[in-house]
Image: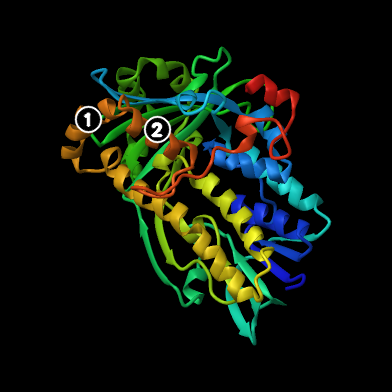
Amino acid sequence: MGPLDIAVIGCGTAGGAAALFLARAGHRVSVFEAVKDPGPVGAGIMVQPIGMRVLARLGLLERILERGSRVERLRCLTTGGRTVLDLAYGDYHPRAFGLGLHRGVLFEEIFSAVRKEPGVTLRTGHPIEDLRVEGRRRRLVEKDGDEHGPFDLVVVADGARSQLRDDAPLTHREARYPWGALWFIGDDPDGDFAGTLFQRVRSTTEMLGLLPSGLGTRGDTPKVSLFWSLRVDEVDAWRKKGLGPWKDHLRKLEPRSAPVLDQIDSVDEILFATYWDIVLSPWNTDAVVFLGDAAHATSPQLGQGANLALVDAYALARALGSGAPSLSEALVAYSRSREAHLGYYQWATRFVTPFFQSDRTVLAVPRDLFMGLACKLPYVKTRMIRTMCGLERGVLLADPLPLPDLFTRQGDDGPDLGVYRTLA
C-alpha cells in the first residue's frame, strides 16, 4: 500500500496529531478545520504518561513540558475530611507524573506544527457536513455544496458533536451527560496548588476541583483551573443568582479556593462544559475512520480525553504502516488494536462518574466508606494508578500498556532535555 490521499476533518488533538503522523509517513494529507481562525480556548486538562509518549514521538513534548505543571498526586476529600482518593504517580514508578496544562497550549503546539508540516495542506473555515461515496473513495461536501476530493481515506476527528457519524454505517449511540462543569483559570503566583490535583466532594452532587495548569498560553505566572460540577439544566438558574452566593458556598466547602474565586468578577469569565458519551462500533468503514471524541467521547472523570485522542492518532499511523495488503484491512487492524484500551476507559468512566457527578446520592455512601481504603490495598492501588496513567487495557487479567520509556530511561523513545531533567 503506497502513499494515500488523506483528508482529516478537524484540527484538534486527534486530527492534528493524526495529520502530523500520516504526513511524516509519506501520505498526502489535507486538513479541513471548520473554524476560520482557530485559537486557544478551554480550561485545564491532564496529560498523562501515555499521552506524553505520543507527544514525544511528535517532537512536541519539550515545549509542552515547559508550559505545564507537574502533578504528582490526585487527592479527593469529603467535606468532613474523609479520604476518597489518594493516588501518587510515584507509587507506580519514581519518575512517573502527570502534567496539568491549559488546553490551549496543547492546541497551539499541535496546530503550529500542522501549519509548518510540509506534507500537510491546512484549510480553515471549511465545515464539512457530508461524505459522498465515489467508488472506493470519498468526497467531502460543505454546507454550501462545495466539494473536495476524492480521497482514499477520510479521518473524522471533529469532536463529540460530529454530524458525520450519521454518514457511516456503524453502530453508534450518543447521549449527553446530565452533568457538566463550570471552569475558570486563575493565577496561582505562589504555587499554592502546585503538585496535586485536588477535589472536595459532598455527596454525589457537589464536586470542587483545583488543577495546577502550567503557565497558560502566554506569560510566566502559574495558573490553576477551578472546576465545579453542575447539572446542565441548572446553568441558567446559576447565572441568574449571580456570583455572590456561589462564591460563598465554595469558600465554605473549600477555604483554599478563596484566592481563585476572588479573581472572578463576572459569570461571563466562567466556561460551562458539557460532556457526551459516544459509542461507535467499530471505529471504521472501508475508507473512513473516526478518532478522538468523534469516536469515543466520555465524561472527563478519569482525565483521559486528550490522551486517548493522541494514542488514536499514533495507532492509526502504525496500522497504515504495518504492511497490510489493503486500506480496509489496515483500518480493521486499527479498530482491533484500540478495542481493549478504549473499551476499558469507556467502561471505567461510565462506572465511576455516577459516584462523583449524579443525582444517585446513595452512591456516596460506598464511595466514602471504601474508596479511600481501596487506595491502601497494594494491588487495587496499582490498578488505580495505572488507570490514572492511561495504561490499563482491561478490568480483570489484561496486561497493561508499559510505562513509556521516557519515564524509565533516556533514549530514542524519549526526550533528553534539560527541561525534562528538571521535571524527572
Q: Position of residue 324 (x, y in %)?
A: 65, 71
Q: Mark 2, residues whose alpha carbon is within 10 Å: few (<14), some, or many (≥20)?
A: some
In depth, the one of 1 and 227 nearer the eye is: 1
Tell me the distance, in whole angstroms, between the alpha carbons under discs 1 and 2: 16 Å
In depth, the one of 18 and 129 nearer the eye is: 18
Q: Position of residue 355 (x, y in %)?
A: 26, 39
Above-or-below relation of 167 to 161: below
- Which residue is under mark 2? 382
- Which residue is under mark 1? 370
In depth, the one of 174 and 182 nearer the eye is: 174
The answer to whether residue 141 is visible is: no
- Mark 1 lies on a secondary structure that is helix
Is 5 left or right of 181, judged from the image as shown? right
Above-or-below relation of 2 to 421: below
Q: Position of residue 159 (x, y in %)?
A: 53, 57
As shown in the figure, which amino acid type bears the numbered disc 1? Phe
Q: Position of residue 331 (x, y in %)?
A: 58, 69
Which residue is the extreme one toward the bottom?
135
Q: Residue at x 65, y 72 (%)?
A: 153
Which residue is the extreme one toward the right?
118
